Structures are given as structure tokens and as C-alpha cells.
Amino acid sequence: MVLNNNINHEVISNMTVPQLKALCKELRGCILRTVMKNGGHLSSNLGTVELAVAIHYVYDVFGGDKVIWDVGHQAYAHKLLTGRHSRFDTLRKKDGVSGFTRRAESPADAFISGHSSTSISAAYGISTAMRLKGEDGAVAAVIGDGALTGGMAYEGLNNAGKTASSLTLILNDNAMSISKSTGALARYLAQIRSTRKYYCAKERVKSALSSVPLVGRSLERAVAATKTLVKEALYDSSNLFENLGFAYIGPVDGHNIEDLTEALSVAKLMKRPCVVHVFTRKGRGYKPAEENPGEYHAVAKNGVVEEFVYDNVPHSDGSFSEAFGRELERLGKEDSRICAITAAMKYAVGLNYFKNSCAPRFFDTGIAEQHSVTFAAGLAVQGMLPVFAVYSTFLQRGFDQMIHDCAIEKTHITLCIDRAGFVGADGETHQGIFDVPMLRAIPNTVIYCPATYEELRRCLSEAIYRTEGIACVRYPKGEEPDIMGKHFNSAFDPVCSYYYSGKRSDVLGITYGRIASDLANACEKTGADMLRLVTVEPFPQGIFNIAFGYKKIVFFEEGSVRGGAAEGFLAELAWRGYRGKAECVGVADGFVPAATVEEQLAMYGLNEECMTEILRS
């Protein structure tokens, strides 16, 4: 066993090929055991083991070189090779090793990476700063073909190709992001992969010419002058990366440690912008993940697969995502105007059902949330009813498009916001706590926050058919909570958009969404009254009249209270002249770290026990 906390570039760079292969085997075993126990991203990390080892063979991340991983969920082997082996069993746990790269965790992590398509811009900035400071270190960025579908990656490519810095972009090409990569770029990379004959032929010719006695080197130099013509004849087109100013090496077998170390060493020696095109296989070394890489993209604790994968999943409302997906499929069958959009998350957001039934109106844009919002707006102005299903954390990228392309002219699109609120172990980069403050700031926007599957169905219909401008339906990860029916009416009223328990005390608890279940139990224990909102923007006007009947009001919000619904409600209540005691409980400052959802709710006073104590105080 060679894997331990003391392994580093010096140790790895002195290993023999058999030793490097043994190290890869250890890494793969450690990743598999830990992820199956703790949960995490499996397929992507099993696919980058040899690549991580080769990178640390060539680059010294503690000696001046910098490596950026895009996205960080493919960097588990990198973490194990940079002093975090002894703590790796804490992966994705509270106060443990993050599931993504973070500078605060280790100096070996050059840049935070929870959202995709950022690595090229970051690497260009880092390499430029190093050059300006006179530092000699090299910079490498690992970006997947899925992340290369994001528009920001092209902004980075457009600028980085002109740098004089030592910058290598390692394109980890596995023909997938979370879902299978789609679009023109995927076809382009497939074309490059299909022309490996050029590289093999070139090496055979070079070797043969060099072996000719006396004149071999001269012949080799003469033939080199014609290589562009030969390459273009084989490609039938120019190479995108070379045209943007990068040298191009590859494709390289991403599981051949000798080829990888050679290619990366050459790229580093060039001291100029270079693309090393590596092809890998997600799930490498674990047969179930190799055969179903999408299924094993994310694994929950104890080896339970989290993602939707198979198209023949039995009808079961096992989560909000699936309840949404089934309902949109039903609506789509009835109305040919409905279109569904995903940013490379078809299974994760439940749109596989819609695709099966309404394929011509299903669109996977790749990792391109900004494009998705404006694309939806384009559909809308021509009379279609677009529905963009997206994680809360990723919707943040489309803020400008929501304002400029949708809200100003009340262009009607529906945003179905999955993973709203706390999401658990993915940590700071993925919590869905900013969508309510962000969306409340945009005029002509309506926000629905259903707490049950049935409410989700009704809110979806309201959003699509009876709302102008931007209609948002937000819901949490996982299953619906146990809402205590005796506290609420049985039917959703789209006019009033709230539930009220009735007046029985001087204390009122207010909330919306998933945590209503805990608040209902807390109110039952304390005798407090409860108001649950279904629409948090705009506020139903009747709730202010209700609030004036109470001496104490506590608004519990599973999200940021800065600019959130709680802060907005209490500000308007004060403006209307309320003089009682009022407070909001939620994420008052900072970011939510990795932990279980239950731990996160307790940390911010949003579970039943905390709510009970706060209502009684």
C-alpha cells in the first residue's frame, strides 16, 4: 500500500509504471468504498483516477504549479493525493472533506469549483497573475466535455488562447456531463476522437524517417513542413482549439498512465497555451458504474443511487422531482404548446418522462443556464409555454437573462426550481438558499412554494396557465414532509395562496415549503397559531390583517433571510404600523456548510425542537 498522507509530487514522479498502476488501483478502491458509505459522486471520480495520478506526476501543486478542476466533483483522487487521505472518510460530512475543491480546505486546491465551466477563466487569471509577478509555475485546468458546453468556457477559450503564460487545458472527454453530452460540440469532439489515425500515422512516419541513416533527420524536418496539409486532409476541417491559439495534443487514452504522463510533460514544457485532449470512461474499474455511468453519477449513503436513470421507471411519486416530472408529462400530452428545457439534468429534475412522451418539445441545452432562460423567452414570444426545470443553485447563473429577457416585457416562462432550500452534503456551492431573495428582487415575478406533491401539481398548472411574466415553482430535494392535515384546509386555494390555523393565541408562526411540517408540530406543542404561505411573491394581502392580531410573530425561512420572504414580510408589516414583537429565523449570514439536511435545519433553528423553543421564548 502506497496511498497515505505523505504521498506527493516527489514520491509520485519517482514511481515506476507498475507502481503508478498500483497506486491507481488503491485510489479507485478507496473512492469506491468511501462513496458507497458516505454518498457522493462516483462515476466521474472513477473515470479520472489515472488522470489525477498523471497530473501529480507532472505538476507539483505544493511547489508552485496550480491545478484547477472543473467541476470539483471529479477531484476525489486529487484530494487523496494531496494530504487528505487520513480524513477522506469524512467526505461530505459536517466539518469533513468537501465534495468539491475549496481553497480554504487545502493549498493544493487552486480554485473553488462547485459550478461548471469556470476553470478556463480561472486558470487564465491565475496564470496571468503568476506571469505578471515573475513566478515560474505552470497552470493546468481540467475541464470535462460536459462543462465545455457552458458559454463561460468559450469566453475563457477566446481570451486564454492569446496569453503568453504556461497554461494547459486538459479536456477530459467522456461524452457525458451528468446526462449524455448533446449538441454540436459533442459531435465535434466525437469527430476529433475519430481521427486518431492521424496521430498514429504521424508517429509511425516520424519514427520511420528518423531511422533512415544519415539523412533521416533532414527528411523528418522536410516532412514536418507539410504536416498542416496532411492534418487538414485528414480532419476535413480546422481544429477549433488551434484556431483559438492553443497547441493541441491528443486524443490521449485517459487510462494509459504512460501516454498521459508523456502528453502532460510535453504540454508543460511548451510554456504556452495548450490543450491536451484526454478521453476517459466514467465509472472506470467498477462494472455497474461503467455500464450505467448516469445512474452512478451520484450515490447516496450506503450505496443508494440518487439520480433518475431508466426510462421505464414505475409510476411512483417518490420525490418532488418525480412528482413534477410526471405531472409535466401529463400536461404536455394534453397541450402541444408546452415545452420542457433542462441544462444537462434530464434525469435529475425528472424530465425523462416528458422526453419519452413529448420528445420534439424536449430540449437539453447542455450546461448553459443563461442560454436556457433566453431560449425559453424566445419560445414564449412565439406563443409556446416553456418550462425550464433547474436546480436552485444553478438558476443563479441566469439572473440577468431573467431580468432583461423576461421580466421587463412580462414574457411568460415557468421556472421549476428543484433542490430549493438545504440540500445536505454538497456544501456551500449547492445550497438552494438564494433563489427567493434573487427572484423577489425581479419585478413581474410570482413565486409558488408548494409543501406537498398535490400542491406542486396545482401550483404547476397555476404557473403555466394563469400567471404572467416569470412564474416560479420551487420545491425541495427528496420526499414530501408529513404535513399535519388538521392544521390546514384540504384543498389548495389559488386565490388566497395561504393556509391559516385560526386565532387561538397571541403567538403566530409563519413559514412556507418543506419546514411547514415541523412548524405545525411545534405550534401544536406550544399552542401557537400557524400561517403557511404557498405564494411568497407577491404576498397575499390577507395575511397582513391576520398578523395584526398577534403580539408575537416568528417567520421561519429555509433560506437566506437577507432579501428573503421573511425580511420582506416583516418590513411591510412594520411599514403598515405593526408594533408587536417580530423576528425572522433562517440563514442570517454566510453560507451553509456540508452536513445532513437534518443537521442543517438544526443549525439554523428550523427543526421542530428549535421552533418549539423559539415560539415559547
Image: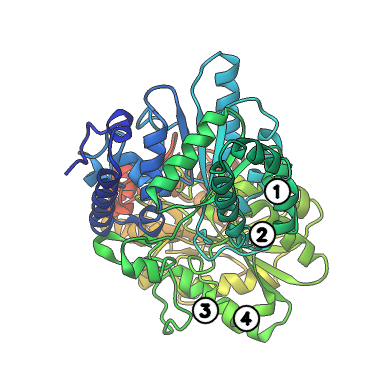
Helix, strand or loop under label 2: helix
In three-dimensional space, the C-alpha distance between marks 4 and 1, rounded to whole angstroms, equals: 42 Å
Q: Quadrant of the N terminus?
A: top left
Q: Earlier in the sequence, mark 4 or mark 2?
A: 2
Identity, as a three-letter code, of the amino acid under mark 2: Tyr
From the viewer's side, name the closer residue of 592 and 215: 215
In three-dimensional space, the C-alpha distance between marks 2 and 3, rounded to whole angstroms, equals: 34 Å
In three-dimensional space, the C-alpha distance between marks 4 and 3, rounded to whole angstroms, equals: 9 Å
Residue at which label 4 appears: 331
Residue at which label 2 appears: 188
Q: Quadrant of the C terminus?
A: top left
Q: Earlier in the sequence, mark 2 or mark 3?
A: 2
In three-dimensional space, the C-alpha distance between marks 1 and 3, rounded to whole angstroms, equals: 41 Å
Is 399 above or below relative to 489? above
Horizontal and vertical percent position of residue 294: 44, 66
Cβ–Cβ below 8 Å for labels 4 and 3? no
Residue at which label 1 appears: 240
Helix, strand or loop under label 1: helix
Q: Residue furthest left?
A: 1
Residue at which label 3 appears: 326
Which of the 4 quarters of the picture holds residue 542? bottom right
Mark 4, other Cα within 10 Å: few <14 / some 14–19 / many ≥20: some
Mark 1, other Cα within 10 Å: few <14 / some 14–19 / many ≥20: few
Helix, strand or loop under label 4: helix
Horizontal and vertical percent position of residue 408: 79, 51
Cβ–Cβ below 8 Å for labels 1 and 2? yes
